[in-house]
Amino acid sequence: MDECCADKSSALTRLRDRQAATLRVVLFLNAGMFAVEFVTGLLAGSVALLSDSLDMLGDALVYGFSLYVVNRSAVWKARVALAKAAVMGLFGAVVLGQLIFKLVHPEVPHFVAMGVVGALAFVVNGVCFGLLWQHRAEDINMRSVWLCSRNDLIANLSVLFAALAVWQVQSPWPDILVGAFICAMFMRSALAVAREAHDELRVSQA
């Protein structure tokens, strides 16, 4: 019996070590891409890039939270998942503010910069998605970060679509519409993670 428990403890330790290693990598990648996209979004006048950069920043914070609780209990993981939902909702509100500003002060963004940086972000998030895929069903903590990564790929494709559309029509509207789409995706994800975390807390505390 003691040997069996020791084996289970060792396996759990190895699992948590693998999770922590993956989270460190995706945290670094997302923090770096946030800086690139935020600066480029400001210079290019693109609300879609700015929205996607905030997505990257939000994910970096989410991965940091997840790294903090990787060795903690299910209750802790559920509580931090609620914090992640709050972060996603907060950045959704920031994006909404950017959208309102662009509606009042519209400008045609620099579509080349949008396309190049959007493509780079798609590649980076593809790497993160691949790393997190193997952990997606392990616990609520890792599932929530995998959902963030999946949403990132959708947002990146949307930015690329916006860049192409801006080039074709020479209008700020594709950029604004994509920013609105990313904002809606933020809020939907925040609600989904919050609902799942609430259910996990209810089960853990029962």
Image: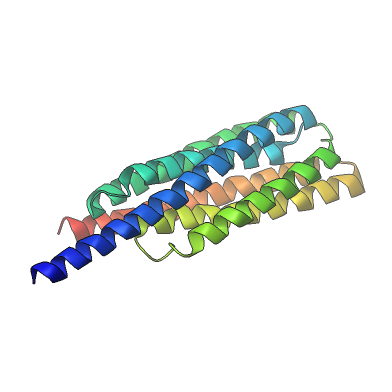
Give the image location of residue 29, x and y in percent. Answer: 57, 43
Asked if residue 92 can be seen in this view, the reply is no
Question: Along the line of sight, which residue is nearer the eye, 188 or 123?
Answer: 123
Q: Residue at x 72, y 33 (%)?
A: 41
In the rendered image, the vertical position of residue 39 relative to residue 123, given as above or below = above
Give the image location of residue 47, x and y in percent. Answer: 71, 37
Q: Residue at x 91, y 49 (%)?
A: 168
Q: How is the image coloured?
A: rainbow
Give the image location of residue 91, x and y in percent. Answer: 53, 37
Q: Which quarter of the rendering shows the C terminus?
A: bottom left
Residue positioned most to the front: 3
Left or right of residue 76: residue 98: right
Q: How many marks?
A: 0
Give the image location of residue 34, x and y in percent. Answer: 61, 36
Residue positioned most to the left: 1
Q: Residue at x 63, y 39 (%)?
A: 33
Q: Which quarter of the rendering shows the N terminus?
A: bottom left
Left or right of residue 30: residue 81: left
Q: Residue at x 74, y 42 (%)?
A: 117
Q: Residue 130's quadrant in the figure?
A: bottom right
Asked if residue 54 can be seen in this view, the reply is yes
In the rendered image, the vertical position of residue 7 relative to residue 73, given as above or below = below
Q: Residue 141's quadrant in the figure?
A: bottom left
Left or right of residue 119: residue 182: left
